Amino acid sequence: MNTVIKNIIRFSLFIAVQVFVLDKIHLHQMATPYIYFLFILWLPFRLSRPWQMVIAFALGFTLDSFRHHPGFHTAACVLIAYIRPFLVNLMIPQEGADTNYEEPSITSMGGMLPYMIFTGVLTFIHHAWLFMLEAWQFGNIWYFLVKTLLSTGISLMLIIITELLFVRKQKFKTNTI
Amino acid sequence: MRNIFLFIRRYFNLLFFIFLQGISIYLIVHYSRYHKAMFGNFMNQVTGKVNEQYSQVDHYFRLKKTNDSLMAANEKLYNKLRSDFDLPDTTSRSVIDTIRVDSLEQFRKYQYLKAKVVANSVVSQNNFIVIGRGSSGQLKEGMGVIDPNNGVVGIITDLSKDYAVVMSLLHTDSHISGKLLHGGETGTLSWDGKTPNIISLTGIPKSAKVARGDTIITSGFSTSFPRGKMIGIVEEVIPEKSTNNFRIKFKSTANFYNLDFVFVIDNRQAEPIGKLLDQVKKQGQ
């Protein structure tokens, strides 16, 4: 399937799941499950960085429209889209793996551990920035830390489940481009 | 000049990132002004349509709960019926009839308009409810919203043709005035953004007699709610150390987790009162 069409479908699915499934689950005030930003983590390697940020902006803005207060998720999404390429460069195991594979996954990152570090760090940054913007006026550091850590845990669990349920077949391309 | 272009080219990603973050934070801070100008009407209509499709499915699964709450509301209304009361013979007692019925519809002050909840949130720190009735259904900004059991839910902040956004009590910017039923002291409601259904009432002097289980009602000072709509029941009374006031934590009457139908209160006299206030403000300038 064409990459563009695939990503458009993914975009709408992630938004739908976030708005109509996860937002309806009231687990606890301290632990809010988020998964929609996995869309940004799954963007192709070869996409240029400004485009990644523009797409992240669009994703965050769409989710914010459903929450009726624009800005929060937009800011968090743009931040992780900006940081993502640095992490990809750090975590990618062998030379040129980002040209051999299309997008980040367990196989292309070279195992479960690097992939989990990659998603874990970005999830944590996303949550921390989001909750910090939301709790601007409260300034209770423990509340903020516990909420971020618990939510990161729940979101990571959801991401693992998603990875296990939807296996993305990654074609290995030769490095002669 | 060439150096500036070189600089921009080298740090384009960083600059672009800062630019996008700037837009987002601008949106957060200037939310209300921006929201009303361009976001409100169009996005409300779009997300409202999507949410309505979903709520049609969701609504089916909650029929039982909705039924129960409607039954409770009906029960209350039946108890108010005239036929429930065995009226004494009018010849034995003279009564001045003060109730203005039907033919005097122009004396009506409050009208209740029913609306269906299309989308609802409780987990974030600024919660909104979207209802499936808008400016075409004679709603206006600033009208109060209650649930079928007369518990206060919030105030309408944004409108489109078919949908309205309600700022619920569970919003950190929501400040409705509340009153103790027992003593009559008035204070302001605020939500700390943590536990849903638990809201605080501030500004009640320490001289007031408050106990757990007391009722908090609307004060009737604003044009949004009539006096005496129930807001909640006191859970905990905390004396503030730095001021002479209590901080009262109470449980809201409206259960924000399972709102399905709500009533919007249309105050027919809101407009003349608003005009009068505007006049006073102008004179003061």
Image: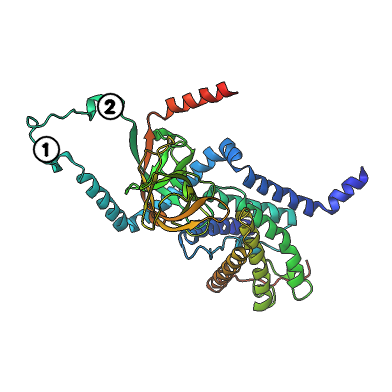
Q: Is residue A46 visible?
A: no
Question: Splitting the image into 4 quarters, where does residue B211 fall?
Answer: bottom left
| Image quarter hosting the N terminus of chain B | top right
Question: Quick check: A13 above or below A175?
Answer: above
- Residue B139 horizontal side relative to residue A111, left or right: left
- Name the kind of residue labelled 1 in the image: Leu
How many labels sit on residues? 2
Marks 1 and 2, Cα distance to the nearest angstrom?
24 Å
- The amino acid beneath tag 2 is Glu
Query: Is residue A81 at all visible to an observer of this figure?
Result: yes
Q: Which mark is residue B87?
A: 1
Where does residue B263 sit, x and y in percent of width and height? 35, 43
- Co-location on one chain, circles 1 and 2: yes
**Subunit ID for the residue under disc 1:** B
- Where B163 falls versus A3 (above or below)? above
Q: Residue furthest front?
A: B207
Kindly identify the residue that appears in the image at 24 percent across and 28 percent down.
B100
Q: Are marks 1 and 2 in contact (CB under 8 Å)?
A: no
Badge 2 sits on which subunit?
Answer: B
- Name the secondary structure under disc 1: loop
Q: Position of residue B227 (x, y in %)?
A: 37, 39
Find residue B105 and name its label: 2
